[in-house]
Image (spheres, grey):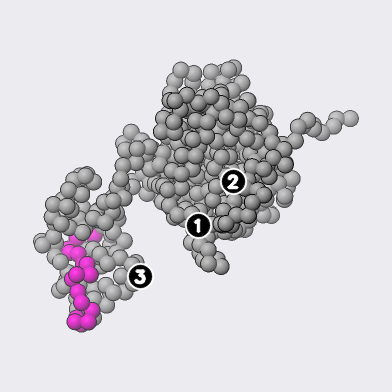
Amino acid sequence: MNMAFYYDEPAHTFSEYLLVPGYSSSECVPANVDLRTPLVKFKKGEEPAITMNIPLVSAIMQSVSDDKMAVALSKEGGISFIYGSQSIEDEAAMVERVKTHRAGFVSSDSNIRPDSTLADIIALKERTGHSTVAVTSDGTVNGKLEGIVTSRDYRVSRMDLNTKVKDFMTPIDEMITAPAETTLQEANDIIWEHKLNTLPIIDDEGKLLYMVFRKDYATHKEYPLELLDSKKRHIVGAGINTRDYAERVPALVNAGVDVLCIDSSEGYSEWQKITLAWIREHYGDSVKVGAGNVVDAAGFRFLAECGADFVKVGIGGGSICITREQKGIGRGQATAVIEVAKARDEYYKETGIYVPICSDGGIVYDYHMTLALAMGADFLMLGRYFARFDESPTNKVNINGNYMKEYWGEGSNRARNWQRYDLGGAQKLSFEEGVDSYVPYAGSLKDNVTLTLNKVRSTMCNCGALNIPELQAKAKITLVSATSIVEGGAHDVILKDNSMNNYVK
């Protein structure tokens, strides 16, 4: 009689490991650490089509990755995968907004017609919070620009609320504007030279394209690691499923997406094979697509042979994921990464093709990121981590005096992303594999990612490594006992400040 297969070793999580420091030379300072890493597969001796400047991507989730997150993460050198649990048109529109985004060039979201009234201006200001209003012929964002209204153009106490906008606006012939081809540097020079607060950018027909604001000047600092394509546009990814790929993939490709990823809780399946085969048949290797998720060598090899550009590792380790509780499937994230990394290296030896792996889920503390990289991950996918920031799509709410951001799993009733958990059959979510929750609000993405990666760079120096491949070659990793995990935190003292909770690490 055949028996089930039993693993000899228990599966471990990141918290059960520590890195043992190695020799650090005087060269080994955090500023010298290079965090570049391949996103997609490449042949020995060749360069990957896309290399990221930092090893972080944001999760394919409604509560994490929209166009705002994508622009913010691309500026820091990483990539967002826009969530696929929305209509094809909406996802493609998000991708397009990322690809057409120009830093400092803002689409005017406060617009009014010349025959509107002061009362309309006040109502608009109340709704948007913006005191600068573009006056366009038809009141739309790209209408013919006829003038501008700022708070200096009217006094509510001294004017009739029925006064027409055209009677108190600053008309176009008294304004300074700039043409469509103006660069941000040129726009800022015009703003400074003429002491403007706002510079409208218009096309040859006088239609409004963008506004450049003086107050944004400080935020246009250089982003040295910014990840851009050959046309200087932000690089962006997007999630797809194994059902509507024949319609979704072309729409995303037409919108300019740089890389796709099949979003599935369990990727060792014929559905992924069929999806990958369809993409290769229609696009060859020109469309980059990752697949997953898997937790062992067999799953990795299957997807690599099906043509995946990268493979995502992890089942049930996400903070909002209850797949392990609900279905009893999964594997400790550290063990899964270690085994899959070994399989990737063997596949590379055999075929000369390097298929990067992404550790997805199970990262609680910043040092877990360094561990995952040391264990062989090429990059990491993070959900909870990014959900905490200003740039995530969710609401900031006050819970008992603390600011929180909402965060929910794709397998929750709120997201209803049944395609992600699809095994064929009825098109519905039969039971939940994710929860709806709050995470502590943490501020801006830039500040947090900078701090996190400074910790990663510092730890890599402790291990004598100046880049990720070097870390993977040199790292010495030890399992730790339950008792020594306790020893690792603050212990046997009374903390003066008890607010150091586990989320901020």
Q: Name the residue carrying label 2.
A: 364
Q: Are marks 2 and 1 in contact (CB under 8 Å)?
A: no
- Can residue 130 be seen? yes
* Amino acid tagged 3: Arg
Judged from this view, the residue extending furthest toward the right is 1
Of residues 226 and 146, the one drawn nearer to the viewer in this rendering: 226
Task: Count the numbered circles shown.
Answer: 3
3D distance between C-alphas at marks 2 and 1: 15 Å
Residue 402 drawn above or below residue 276:
below
Of residue 444 and residue 406, the one placed in the foreground of this image is: 444
Residue 409 locus on image (x, y percent): 59, 52
Residue 441's disc is 1
Image coords of residue 365 (percent x, y): 57, 44
Horizontal side of 219 relative to 397 (left or right) equals left
Q: Secondary structure at mark 2?
A: loop
Q: Mark 2: few, some, or many residues within 10 Å (few <14, many ≥20)?
A: some
**Residue stretch in magenta:** 143-160
Callout 1: 10 Å neighbours few (<14), some, many (20+)? many
Return the residue found at the far front.
493
Quote the CA–CA distance across marks 1 and 3. Answer: 25 Å
The single residue placed furthest to the left in the displayed view is 173
Residue drawn at x 16%, y 55% as measured from the top left: 177
| Image x and y of residue 338, in percent | 64, 30
Give the image quarter of residue 35.
Answer: top left
Q: Is 434 left, or right, of 135 in this rendering?
A: right
Instruction: Inspect this view and state whether residue 416 appears.
Output: no
Residue drawn at the location 65% of the way across and 36% of the way down: 17
Residue at 85% in and 32% down:
3
Q: Which residue is mark 3?
A: 127
Residue drawn at x 73%, y 47% as measured from the top left: 327
